Image (cartoon, rainbow, N blue to C red):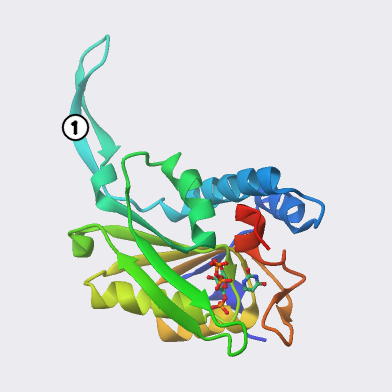
Amino acid sequence: MEDFYNMPNITIFTHPLIQHKISLMRDKNTGTNEFRKLAEEVATLEGFEALSDLPTEEVEIETPIEKCMTPMISGRKLAIVPILRAGLGMVPGLLTLVPTAKVGHIGLYRDEETHEPHEYYCKLPRPIEERTIIVTDPMLATGGSAVDAITQIKEHGGVNIKFMCIIAAPEGLKKLHDAHPDVHIYVGHLDRELNETAYICPGLGDAGDRIFGTK
Ligand code: PRP
Ligand code: URA
């Protein structure tokens, strides 16, 4: 297997808080309400690192002591783009960090037989080319959905793109990194493999169904 842990543009988290919360998400007895909260919390923790290179600008602030120039980030420079549906579950966790970020949407679903992604929606904030874009999807399985979503964002002019997931399979991580080596990929946990129906093992099941309480 490739050494994903030492590749530029791939960050695989080992922080105990992230690992603990992902373990709770894996538990089949974790209900929708708790699962949703955990997805948000993991997104916040991953986002803290993924946003560490957000551009800042010096602004003048008057403290009780004196005026000074001090750095602030501009929320206008960030776009969060969830892959529907399950990616929506990570958006509130990132908005906690940057409440003024704009949010786009990419609608994709995976064909249950072929596992190929099918697009049904794309709406991105403008001007997309000037923004740092974080694409969210809890599951990077075959990688087909993420590759397709990022290709679409690039076709619309997106340049500075990051991808954040909660669990990845090695197969999907390789596919995404090979297809878009310029995209920094943030992975909460790298799992063992895909099974014959392209589900991640041990994984957490169907992320969309667990976030939205459907089946
Ligand atoms: C899931 C998941 C990803 C995709 C991952 O979505 O949220 O988008 O599968 O699989 P891949 O890496 O093999 O493409 P799904 O298609 O089930 O749609 P949903 O989010 O609407 O449930
Ligand atoms: N999509 C999911 O929601 N879970 C998987 O394990 C694979 C794809």
Q: Is residue 38 above or below residue 123?
A: above
Residue 32 lies, in percent from the top left, at 68, 48
User: How would you rate the neighbour count of disc 1 (Cα within 10 Å): few for under 14, some for 14-19, many for 20 or more?
Assistant: few
Q: Is mark 1 within 8 Å of ligand 1?
A: no
Ligand 1: quadrant of the figure: bottom right
Q: Which residue lies at the image location 21% right of the left edge and 13% below the top edge?
A: 66
Q: Which residue lies at the image location 67% right of the left edge and 43% below the top edge?
A: 33
Determine the residue located farthest toward the top in the rendered image: 64
Q: Is residue 175 above or below residue 8?
A: below
Q: Nearer the viewer, residue 28 or 192?
A: 28
Across the whole image, how many numbered discs are drawn on residues? Answer: 1
Q: Amino acid at mark 1?
A: Val
Determine the residue located farthest toward the bottom in the rendered image: 114
Q: Is residue 8 visible?
A: no
- Quadrant of the frame with the N terminus: bottom right
Q: Nearer the viewer, residue 143 or 13?
A: 143
Please, what secondary structure does the residue beneath circle 1 have?
strand
Report whether 85 appears left or right of 27: left
Q: Which residue lies at the image location 40% right of the left edge and 77% below the top edge?
A: 119
- Quadrant of the frame with the C terminus: bottom right
Report whether 117 appears left or right of 19: left
Report whether 194 appears left or right of 127: right
Residue 188 lies, in percent from the top left, at 61, 60
Report whether 99 appears left or right of 41: left
Residue 40 lies, in percent from the top left, at 56, 46
Q: Quadrant of residue 207?
A: bottom right
Q: Quadrant of residue 171?
A: bottom right
Q: Which residue lies at the image location 64% right of the left edge and 61% below the top edge?
A: 209
Q: Which residue is mark 1?
A: 59
Q: Is residue 20 visible?
A: yes
Residue 81 lies, in percent from the top left, at 38, 60
